[in-house]
Structure formats: C-alpha cells, structure tokens
Image: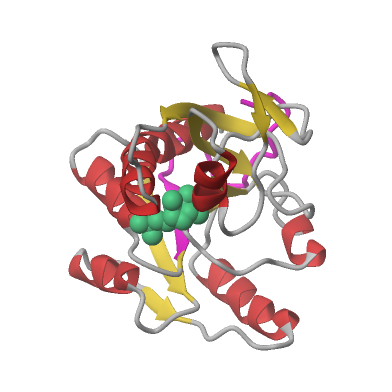
Amino acid sequence: MSQDIQQSSAPASSPLRLAVLVSGSGSNLQALIDAIESGQLPRTRIVLVVSNRADAAGLQRALKHKIPAMYLPWARRREESEAKLQALLELFQVDLIALAGFMKIFTAEFIMRYPERIINLHPALRPDDGGSTYTTSDGTVIPAFRGAHVVPDALKAGVKVTGTSVHYVIPEVDAGPVICREEVKIEEGDTEDTLHERIKAVEHRLVVEAVKAYRKQR
Ligand code: GRF
C-alpha cells in the first residue's frame, strides 16, 4: 500500500463514502455490499453506484440494497460524461471511487482530479515496477497482461498462473501503484469462464481488503 496516500477531506471518524462504477454483473459491488452489511467492512458506505450501461445488473444490485444507482450514458466526447460524473461525485460527497468492472477509460484530466482516490480491479497480475512482465511466486516470468481481454490472453499465452490486482488509477491505462494482488492457478481444461469465475472469487476478497486498507490510512 502506498504510504503517501492523498487524504480525502472527510474526518477520520466519519464513514468512508464510496462510489462504485460498474458496466456489468457487479459481483464485486455485491462483495462490497455484503462486507459492509455483515460488518466486515466497518465505517464504509456505498453512497452511489454509476453505470454506463442501463442494463448492467450492478444497478439492480444497488437498488435492492437501497443504494442510489444512476445510469450515465457515455458520450463520444468523454469529457461530457466525465463532467456529469464529477457533478455526481461532488453531490454525493464521494471520498473513494472503485472501478469494479467499469469498461470505460477516463481522460488524464479526470483522473488527475482524484489522485489516489480511484481504485481499479484488473483481472491479471500487475507488477510493482509497472513493467511488461511479472515474476510469479515460483519464479516464472509471465507477461503483465494489459487491456480488456486479459483473462483469455492469459489462457492463450499458455501460462500456468495468472491472478488479479487492485491498483490505484493513473492516467496510463492498467498501471498505477498496486494495493493488493493474488495469484490464481490456471487448471487443465480451464475456459475463459471457469478461469474468470475463480479470479472473481479472489477479487471479492481483495476488493474488500483494498477498501479496508484505504480506510485505515485515512
Ligand atoms: C472483474 O473481473 C474485474 O477485474 C474486471 O471486470 C470484472 C467485473 O466483474 N475489471 P463484476 O462485474 O464485478 O462481476
């Protein structure tokens, strides 16, 4: 965890106000909701869920738990949507933004407004040095997969281990300081779906851990 974390303005005693951005199923959002409701993630509130897709199941998950859920169509000119998102983040006094399967890429200007206040889930292993390879726990060097298809990419590359990382978002895509990550073994006969499901099972734990670590540093 980065030590020089940018502090949000909220006093330490008040709950961390989290916004979660989703484009799809929202199982990681659900993991956060469950952790908060079970008391596993104390002093944290999901105050807003936003999706660029009206049909994202994540929006329904939020509504079921009485969390404000907004559909924000993504304009061709990203800045237009980002301005609307910024207004929402201000209105809901958001401290931390979690990208949990949010499939849009922000402009550098937007990201720089929230230094170390945006975290992303990346379903592959990100190296600490930001380089193009990752050395697994058994010393094997594998590609540091980047982009929107890293689960099938890992299968295609024939690696034995992949994983998932939670990292801060910086203007460079799929880069930024890693908060936590974990390896996931690729099994014989794995398909994209079976592998991604096992990765997600790990992510559900890691995303809670990452928010908890952020919360402690405030
Ligand atoms: C996760 O695997 C995340 O790493 C990736 O998108 C997936 C989202 O899954 N960025 P879900 O919508 O939380 O189920």
User: What is the span of residues highlighted in magenta in the rendered image?
Assistant: 1-21
Q: Which colour scheme is used?
A: secondary structure
Picture coordinates of residue 44 (x, y %)? 37, 44
Up the image or down, 31 lies above or below 171; here it is above
Tally the marks.
Answer: 0
Up the image or down, 159 lies above or below 76; here it is above
Instruction: Decide whether residue 16 is among the magenta residues.
Output: yes
Does residue 144 appear left or right of residue 183 in this picture?
right
Picture coordinates of residue 38 (x, y %)? 18, 39
Instruction: Decide whether residue 95 is among the magenta residues.
Output: no
Q: In which quarter of the image is residue 59?
A: bottom left
Q: In which quarter of the image is the N terminus?
A: top right
Picture coordinates of residue 98 (x, y %)? 51, 53
What residue is at 27 percent from the left and 44 percent from the top? 36
Question: In this orientation, which residue lies closer to the viewer: 151 or 107?
Answer: 151
Does residue 107 appear left or right of residue 204 in this picture?
right
Q: Is residue 100 visible to the viewer in this orientation of the structure?
A: no
Picture coordinates of residue 56 (x, y %)? 36, 75
What residue is at 54 percent from the left and 37 percent from the top? 158
Question: In this orientation, which residue lies closer to the viewer: 64 or 163?
Answer: 163
Q: Main secondary structure of the magenta part?
A: loop
Question: In this orientation, which residue lies closer to the viewer: 217 or 27?
Answer: 27
Q: Is residue 49 visible to the viewer in this orientation of the structure?
A: yes
What residue is at 50 percent from the left and 82 percent from the top? 72
Does residue 108 appear left or right of residue 185 in this picture?
right
What residue is at 59 percent from the left and 75 percent from the top? 85
Q: In which quarter of the image is the C terminus?
A: top right
Up the image or down, 32 lies above or below 177; here it is below
